[in-house]
Amino acid sequence: MFNIHIAQAKNKYEFEELIKVFLKSSEFQLICAEETDGTDENDGTNRTKIIVPAFTNDSKVGEKKEKELKNQIKRFLYKELQQLTGETPDWGILTGVRPVKLAGELLQREGSEDKARKILVDDYYLTHEKAQLLMDIVAYQRKRVIVSPSDAVGLYLGIPFCPTRCVYCSFPANKGTEAGISAYLVALHSEISFVSEMMRQKGWHPESVYIGGGTPTTLSELQLDELLKHVTEAFDLSRLKEFTVEAGRPDTITVGKLEVIKKYNVQRISINPQSMNRTTLERIGRVHQPEDIEEAFRLARAAGIPMINTDVIAGLPEEETEDFVHTMEQILALAPENITVHTLALKRASRLKEIDSEYSYKQGKRVRAMLNRAKEMLDHAGFKPYYLYRQKQMTGNFENVGYARGDTAGIYNIRIMEEAQTILALGAGGISKVYYPEENRLERIANVSNYEIYIERLDEMLQRKEEQLLK
Ligand code: SF4
């Protein structure tokens, strides 16, 4: 057990995230200045004390001073915990969701890739491989994606339904009754009309439309047709660059739905196997087989869908590196345009977390080997990493990386990570982020995540959007 004292900590949470990379929650107590009530002095246990010294920073002022102070504390904690645990986490002191954004800012400030990479390694303690991965992604994005025009926005529409619930799922995904799905769509159609009017008043147009979930193809052909029809009629799509529907689960894909998708000019779909191993699919609560993935690919290609993304997950229960490599081989043989390699993240709301609360710590080394193999195989097959994000509670504290073949990167995925464009999210669980370029700042507008409450309180959410967007 460890007692960790940080006298200068204003926000305990930020340091807790870093400590959790090394230690389980049950293994430490974090004591900040205002909380020092002597409990650790007299608890009668043999706890190891880590006392973070007070740092001074006279060369910096304001926000920069605060930021540097946090980093000094983090660097101290990292070194101490590295020594005590023998662990050297790949992402150093970085715990945030968007390390690519930091790499881009460093490149902008330093004017050279070498300098930016050196800072990532020397000051943030990233491994050379992770620092290089970030620089590769920044380079890809700068070359292929232009800065967002100020009147362009991303649109996200959430369909919170899935045929079954995966064991690691923490999303508000529901099986949904026929009546429930119908009522939800009525509410969502109202929000579409409302937001399209708001956008017209603001002079905004969509750069990308992303229909995600859940699994949007849980909808019937008719429901999907009505939804896509409404989207294409409500918004000015004359400058649209990308239209995506997540098909996700192959057991929801039919020829009819693919024809509907094609009819409305959707260029991108996701078919997400997660694993191509039969026993794993059963274990994680999926009702499809590896052959269903192959069949879904065949149907999508026959329907003329030009771009397919596939998601795979490293670190699924009881999978060894060779199982994961088998999945990668099978997926590469299907020749998707994009492959997103996720690291399993277990949030509190997932069933797997309830079954085994320490799962994420146990699987760390195995996942590192899986991700390295994935990278080698994808490099070899001509894929380039184009976006990356991290989540809390990721197995081994790794990352999710989207890879693209040629010029097929998903714009929406890049925009949502760079946080320099307004994203309007519609439907249950949608979190809109309005971007103010003058202040380089985002404001969030959240819809409730429960779909039944979303239906009930729709008016309240529309009002909230109107107030924020038109203020
Ligand atoms: S497909 Fe995705 S959203 Fe649906 S249950 Fe599985 S993890 Fe959750």
Image: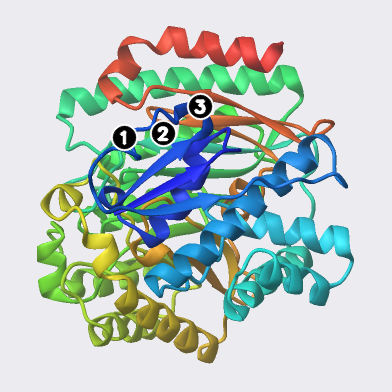
Residue 399 image point, x, y percent? 46, 64
Q: CA distance from mark 3 to mark 2?
A: 53 Å
Residue bearing the label numbered 1: 223
Which mark, residue 30?
A: none
Do the residues bearing badges 2 and 1 touch, measured as CB atoms within 8 Å? yes
Which of pointers 1 and 3 indicates the residue nearer the eye? 3
Indicate the secondary structure of the residue bearing disc 2. helix
Q: Which residue carries the number 3 mark? A: 34
Kindly give the residue lying farthest to the bottom in the view shown. 380
Mark 1 and mark 3: Cα distance apart in space: 56 Å
Q: Is residue 459 left or right of residue 437?
A: left
Which quadrant: the N terminus? Answer: bottom left
Instruction: Please state which amino acid type lies under the numbered disc 3.
Output: Glu
Q: Is residue 77 left or right of residue 270?
A: right
What kind of element bears circle 3? Answer: helix
Disc nearest the viewer among 3 and 2 = 3
Residue 441, relative to residue 283: is it above or below? above
The label shown at residue 227 is 2
In-image side of 421 versus 85 (left or right): right
